[in-house]
Amino acid sequence: MNKVRYGLIGYGKIGSQHVKGLLGGAVKNLDLVAIADTNPERLKAAVEAVGPSLKTFDSAEALIASGCVDAIHICTPHYFHPVYAIKGLEAGLNVMVEKPAGVYTKQVKEMNAVAAKAGKVFGVMFNQRTNPVYQKVRELINEGELGQVTRTNWIITNWFRAQSYYDQGDWRATWGGEGGGVLLNQNPHNLDLFQWICGMPSRVKSVVYYGKHRDIEVEDDVYAIFEYPNGATGCYITTIADAPGTNRLEITGENGKIVVEDNTIVFSRLRESVTSFNQRFKGGIGQPECWRIEVPTKGTYTSHMGIIQNFCDAIQKGTPLMAPGEEGINGLEISNAIHLSSWLGENWVDIPVDDDLFYDKLKEHIDRERKNR
């Protein structure tokens, strides 16, 4: 194929944002040929934006069955990501899903199982993986520059949202509509990067506040601690209430500490590891000599269009995916564990989470929410 025939399912905020990028020629081997949406006014707007050659469908199923596309990109509310991904994969299409991969792990595992059998290209929109800063930090850790990781901390509180943001639609920030709040809407990128760089924790304990700062049902203020398989610990803090907020990632290891803030990497590199120093030092109070290094990066942050370009290259050339769809479950495991810990009295929750238990608790929250409305 000369170009990948591309179809978008959903022409809301993120779908229309992608269309602007695609029409600007950011992806070279893609032809946007179809859009599906249940709202006729959105379809009309899509045709006005793309042109009269655009094929429109009033349902995802109709687009998937049309035969006019090679790949679909799912830009619907969260609960429908796995639903339409499964339909597309079973129809022999390549599939890109927006973040999060889904709301609960049980559903996402079903999607991943279908993807494994389908043998098609399956990606997830974790566009921050294209950021050279996070790529470099991951490289430093994977190549052993930091030594064994002993502590992780991420304060990510620059996701400010006013009440008017939530008042735009009655589906926003609800258990039935979005499946969660700051963890499911804003934080999938950060949770993905956290595990992509530092690895998956083995268990999680949390304190979560629901509707503390805004008139919403779901979480808007989160504090979580992690334990990793090697004994390392971590802390994750997020909210939508702070302005200007903070975005600071700290990763400590045997050879020093890496701090990512303001799009800059600072590596406080020890001359010798803490293990070596501790074994030989007899002076009582002291610590290893430390060098402060600002680490340079190369490349450009290509964001959403970079992920779509990579997705199309994978379809045409077999290029490895930067964000394989199967990896979408990892950050979701963490957010599900954070929720489940708070629902179970702020106790430790193991990862992988108990899929059935989480789903049962989620349904309880949805039912309670419906009764209160």
Image (cartoon, rainbow, N blue to C red):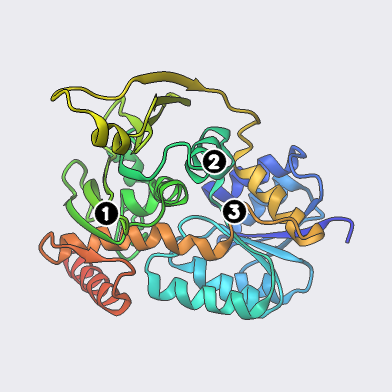
Viewer-nearest of discs 3 and 1:
1
Q: Residue at x 33, y 58 (%)?
A: 334
Sequence-earlier tag: 1 or 2: 2
Kind of residue at badge 2: Glu
What residue is disc 3 on? 42
Q: Nearer the viewer, residue 82 or 224?
A: 224
N-terminal label among 3 and 1: 3
Please give left or right for residue 368 compared with residue 130 in the image: left
Q: Position of residue 137 (x, y in %)?
A: 49, 37
- Mark 3 vs mark 2, foreground winner is 2
Q: Which residue is mark 1?
A: 231
Mark 3 or mark 2: whose residue is earlier in sequence: 3
User: Disc 2 marks which residue?
Assistant: 139
- Give me the residue at 28% from left, 49% from top: 232
- On the question of residue 35 being in view, the answer is yes
Q: Secondary structure at mark 3?
A: helix
Instruction: State which quarter of the image contains the C terminus.
Output: bottom left
Labels 1 & 2 near each other (Cβ < 8 A): no
- Residue extending farthest to the left is 345
Using the image, determine if residue 193 lies above or below residue 176: above
- Element under disc 2: helix
Distance between mark 3 and mark 1 Cα atoms: 51 Å
Q: Please rate how many residues cluster around mark 3, counting C-alpha atoms within 10 Å: few if below 14, some from 14 to 19, many from 20.
A: some
Amino acid at dot 1: Gly
Q: Position of residue 9 (x, y in %)?
A: 61, 62
